[in-house]
Image (tube, rainbow, N blue to C red):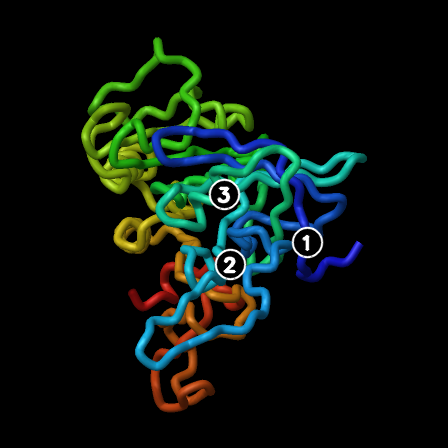
Amino acid sequence: MSQTRDQYAAEVVASIPLCQEHWKLVLHLQHFPTTAPGQFVQVACRDLELNYSQEQDLDWADDQPVQIDHAELSQRLAFLRRPFSLAGRRDSAGGVEIDLIHRVVGMGTDWLSRLKPGQKVQLIGPLGNRHTLPGQKSSDEAVAILVGGGVGIPPMIYLASQLAGRKAVAFCGAVTRNLLPLTITNAAVAPTATSIEPLYNIEEFATFGIPAVISTDDGSYGYQGFVTQALERYLDRYFMDEPARGRAIIYTCGPEVMMKRVAQIAEARRIECQVAVERAMACGMGTCQSCVIRVKKADPAAAPMPGSDWCYRLACTDGPVFLSTDLLW
């Protein structure tokens, strides 16, 4: 099987509402290249098999408005593909299933939420680089700390699936419980508003043996406050000394202001932090150059931009995963 990116037609298996605005789209493909946490796909958020712009003659009088009935001009359509992180993958003899979790915020994601089983979705992938998983060294095995916020939670679920059997804990934050795209399995063990104790009551992580700390800004579930506040308290309680911090690796994805704060917390404690950045992407393959991000250069004299200690990189091909110490926010 080819390991390079390509264009694929996937069949919808299910479109499942997860909370007030998030949906999980389960897609089936006969085959799909090997993927890893951190990678993403570019999804066409409209039916590309339809001809939206059939040619026709127009009678256009100089003093009259033109009558336009082309769908591409008269209707609201998502022209550009949208990037979505992989939230899960399952391989079997019958093919490959991948999970995409999205939040309905515009015409493209609204179209996705209305898909029915059996319909087709065109996507390009897999795209981007990948997270580096922690090594396993007997008793010194590194602890993976997953920090996701909002639509940055889905790639943490896929990462969790690859960490099954290893030491890990997940931190997930949302504005309110109704915007939390996760399944709470044991309401009787609900955390308090000040608790930072990881619990096995979030199905998406508990399935892989990983406990989770949930935070909501309004306190409607779990820790009341930002997920970064819960993370900071947790690190200061359980990773106080230098040897313990050296055995931790933080992975994060979510709103940029959240990731920037996670990076600051990690760097202040000298903990490695891998950041999956989010950028608007028109192509996902480095062609449009629309997803630039500033990073540090190891050698200011080297290209690109000789003489400068920073340069631009592309989130889609150089990333989306970067070390936090390389990013210039």
Image check: 262 left or right of 212?
Answer: left
Please give the residue where the numbered disc 3 appears in the rendered image.
Answer: 112
Q: Nearer the viewer, residue 139 or 322?
A: 322
Mark nearer the N terminus (3 vs 1): 1
> Which residue is at 42% across, 68% downward?
291
Q: Residues within 10 Å of mark 3 (few under 14, many from 20)?
A: many
Residue picked out by circle 2: 81
Instruction: Give the structural element (helix, strand or loop) at label 1.
Output: strand
Q: Nearer the viewer, mark 3 or mark 1?
A: 3
Secondary structure at numbered mark 3: helix
Q: CA distance from mark 3 to mark 1?
A: 16 Å
Residue furthest to the top in view is: 188
* Residue at (43% x, 29% y) in the render: 18
Give, as a three-letter code, the residue at label 3: Leu
The residues tagged by marks 3 and 2 sit, at their Cα atoms, a distance apart of: 12 Å
Residue found 32% across the figure and 33% down from its top: 179
Q: Is residue 220 left or right of residue 25?
A: left
Residues packed near mark 1 inside 10 Å, few (<14), some (14 to 19) or many (20 plus): some
Q: Which quadrant holds the N terminus?
A: bottom right
- Say how many tags the image has: 3
> Residue type at mark 1?
Tyr
The image quarter in which residue 120 lies: top right
Asked if residue 153 can be seen in this view, the reply is yes
Label 2 element class: loop
The vertical placement of 211 against 91, above or below, is above
Q: Earlier in the sequence, mark 1 or mark 2?
A: 1
Amino acid at dot 2: Arg
Q: Circle 1 sits on which residue?
A: 8
Task: Please identify the quadrant where the C terminus is shown.
Answer: bottom left
Q: Nearer the viewer, residue 91 or 42?
A: 42
Q: Residue at x 44, y 20 (%)?
A: 200
Q: Is residue 290 left or right of residue 255?
A: right
